[in-house]
Image (tube, rainbow, N blue to C red):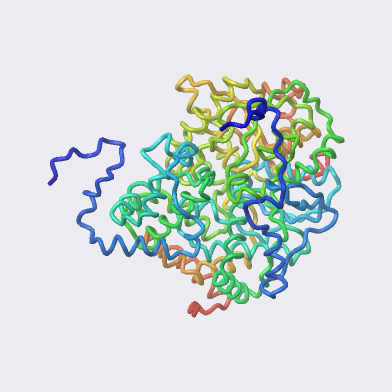
Amino acid sequence: MSGKPQAAPGTLDLSGRQYAHVDYDEKERLLEEVKQDLRFDEYLYGCYECGICVAACPSARFYDFSPRKIAQTMAREDADLFYVFLNDSVWDCSQCFSCDVCPRKNSPGGIITLMREVAVKNGLASAAEALEGYGRVVYKIMSTGTQVSPDMLQANAFPDWGPHVKDIAENLDVWRRAIPPETMHTTETSWQVDSKTITELYLIWHMTGVMDMIKEVDEGLFMILQDVMEEKLEDEGYDLSFD
Amino acid sequence: MIPHSALFNKAKDRKFVADPAQAPTEDYHDIVDQLEREGEWEVHRVPEPYMEEKNKYGRVKKIPVETTWHHKSCGQCGHIPGYSTAVFWINRKLGLDYNDPTDQTSCTAWNYYASATSNAAAQAAVAMRNFAAAEETGYYPIIHCATSFGHYKETRQQLIHSPELRRQVKAIMAKLGKKLVMPEEVVHYSEWVHVMRDRIAEHQVVDMSGLRATIHPACHYHKLIGEDAVYAPEVYGAQRSAIITSLLRTLGLDVRDYSTWFDCCGFGFRHILVSRDFSRSFAVQRKIEVMKEEADPDVLITHDTGCVTTLDQSQFAAKAHDRNVGLPVMSDSQLAALAMGAHPYKVLQLHWHSTNHRPLLEKLGIDHEKAWAEFEESAEEIRSGKKEYLTWEECDV
């Protein structure tokens, strides 16, 4: 145990001590997986260390978060520090891409997208924790093709948005039918989506390995989605071996 | 040594002239066309009539006027339904042909940027499935959400540069019985509002002169593949994207600047759903309060799902902390429709918004109590079974 003080609450511990038990080879493997993504070469060209990305970053104003440090870490291929950011920082990013203002044409936000993807694909506990409470949204988008449905507007889910949320919930069916476009009379989806369209979406999730990613990060959610999708795809006559 | 002329070269006198020949990036049009010639995909051409605008580096971008296929937004249709309704209402009011499809999924990018539970191939396949569905109808895709718009521009970039990704997505499309179709332009609805602003103004019935407004340009509109956004010399010397500001000035509003215009709204994708302390704090402290202190606006106009949501819904909780809030927020489509006489509740659906909009309507001379009573009457007819739905005919189109 080092005599150095632990990082203060709310600050990021960059010492790497918290992950000293993780094999360096494993950290390098994950770093390499990020670098192998087809988008990586367009997201990182180098770093002037100018900090413009940090100045533009909303998350940097709220968290101990630095797109500059993440870009530099990837440029230096520092696997220990990469592993710290992968677990303790990337989920703070707002994904607004304000950091694309970079004069070196880097996209720290894009690098973070890739890091998050690797964290999910490898079932890291930190990714599962970051997505706690989010499974319902993943279920909605993957199973219905639209993400935030009108029936999500419940007073207990959005108490901070104001009393109109309760009014909406209480009048939901009538108020949805009091919207002129015919496609928007729905309550469980944002708009009416064709059955054939949903089938095609399910096929995309299966053929691109997204279901495997879900299985790594949330097995319960995977099983629910698998049941829903298999039933529909089998009804539509699809063989589920997509080789 | 500093040139002598530089001492007299004041910033306000300098003119930025976008020159495509000096653009630091390749022209996506050239590559999209080249890939069509090589048989990699078909290009869905922008139908006539279209308007020509300039993007950040002065390249021409075609914006279709009609025959548009409306790629709807999850958050708009789900939680801010007056946003999309206003886009359709304006089309109807102007007598333009459009398609509101049911063969459309979300771009799924809100979830992707929030949870990363997807990958490049899946995201590209979702995009290309929607583009193929649009092409099959003969209508041209127009994107309602700035995140969908930005993400589809990213997807186009990735497909352009990765033969392997094109091969993978082409195989998926084949299994779905679809062609690989790339639109000639990825068009955001606010670009359509921008090019239609004079026709919108011809139908203006509500005087908006004297109304003070601030605008928030959506990050995923002008920062993601930032060159493919519409700029115009008359709007901040083409140093900021032209959309919204151009419309508001045409309608007679006083568009006021503020120092944190470049800042994000605080949406955060995952944050707005599971870490809203961040979204609320950022929206209030870096956007709403700064606007109120520096510009004293009557209304805040933006052009994206997440921005309207965050900037509007974050203000209620801040009232409990005596923050300087209370600024109504709506989309450019809602404001344009309001100027054209759209009903504040039947069309704009302002009862789905949080911040008090009534003082704004009063300032415009609109009787909100009467309007709400009219909406309630329609709702009661639906509730009692007298009618099933509110129709377009009841909305003056």
Q: At 47% across and 42% down in the image, what residue appears?
A: A53
Q: Is residue B248 visible?
A: yes
Residue found at the very far front of the displayed protein: B1
Q: Assign the C terminus of chain B to one quadrant of the image.
A: top right
Q: At 48% across and 53% down in the image, what residue appears?
A: A110
Q: At 83% across and 42% down in the image, what residue appears?
A: B93
Q: In this picture, is B84 found above or below A212?
A: above
Q: Assign the N terminus of chain B to one quadrant of the image.
A: top right
- Image coordinates of residue B66 in percent, x first then y, are 81, 52
Question: Considering depth in this image, is B151 or B228 the residue closer to the camera?
Answer: B228
- Image coordinates of residue A160 in percent, x first then y, are 47, 32
- Image coordinates of residue B264 in percent, x first then y, are 54, 38
- Image coordinates of residue B288 in percent, x first then y, are 55, 27
Question: Considering depth in this image, is B305 or A60 the residue closer to the camera?
Answer: A60
Question: Considering depth in this image, is A129 or B197 the residue closer to the camera?
Answer: B197
Count of labels in the image: 0
Q: At 69% across and 55% down in the image, what residue appears?
A: B186
Question: Considering depth in this image, is B20 or B304 the residue closer to the camera?
Answer: B20
Judge from the rendering whether residue A137 lies leftward or rightward of residue B96; answer left or right. Answer: left
Q: Is residue B388 visible?
A: no
